[in-house]
Amino acid sequence: MQLKQLFTEDRAVSPVIGVILMVAITVILAAVIGTFVLGLGDQVSETAPQASFSFDYNGSTGLTITHESGEAIPTSQINITGDKLPANPTFSAGGDNQVSAGESADITLTSAFTDGDTVRVVWTSESGSSSSTLQKWTYNG
C-alpha cells in the first residue's frame, strides 16, 4: 500500500451512513415538532401530585378528611366528591391557598352514610384537561 495514496484519498462518508443519519434527524425533528403542534408538550408537566389522605367518619353526619403526607396541592385544583356530601366541600388551607400535610376538611354530611357510599379526593390539572383520583374511601358499616 502506498502511503502517499492513503493521504490523498478524497472519498466521503459512505452513502448508506449518510442516508441513515438523515432519516434519524428527520424522525427526531418530526417527533419534537409533532409534540408541540399537537399540544402534548403542555400535558407533560401536568402530572397528578403524590399525596395521601385519611378519612375519619364519626358514625353520624360528620366526616373529616386529612392530608396525611405528600405534595402540597393548590386548593383550586382539589375537589371532594361523593355520596351524601354538601355542595362544594373544601379543605381549610392556610394563607398560601395550598392544602399541605396536616390540613383537613371537616364536612357535615346531608345524611348518614350507608354501605357502599363513596368519597373521593380528586385533583384536576390547572388547564382542566386532566384529572386523577388521589384517594378513595368507601363506607362499609
Image (cartoon, rainbow, N blue to C red):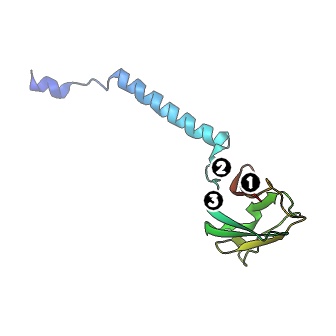
| Three-letter residue code for mark 3 | Pro
Q: Are marks 3 and 1 in contact (CB under 8 Å)?
A: no
Q: Which residue is mark 3?
A: 49
Q: Nearer the viewer, mark 2 or mark 3?
A: 3
**Residues under labels 2 and 3: Cα distance?**
16 Å
| Three-letter residue code for mark 1 | Ser
Say what secondary structure mark 1 lies in.
Answer: loop
Left or right of 14 in this view: 100: right
Left or right of 23 in this view: 94: right
Residue shown at 74% from the left, 54% from the top: 127
Number of labels in the image equals 3
Q: Nearer the viewer, mark 3 or mark 1?
A: 3
Q: Which residue is mark 2?
A: 42
**Residues under labels 3 and 1: Cα distance?**
15 Å
| Three-letter residue code for mark 2 | Asp
Q: Are marks 2 and 1 in contact (CB under 8 Å)?
A: yes
**Earlier residue among tags 3 and 1:** 3
**Earlier residue among tags 2 and 1:** 2
Tag shown at residue 127: 1
Callout 1 environment at 10 Å: few (<14), some (14 to 19), or many (20+)? few
Say what secondary structure mark 3 lies in.
Answer: loop
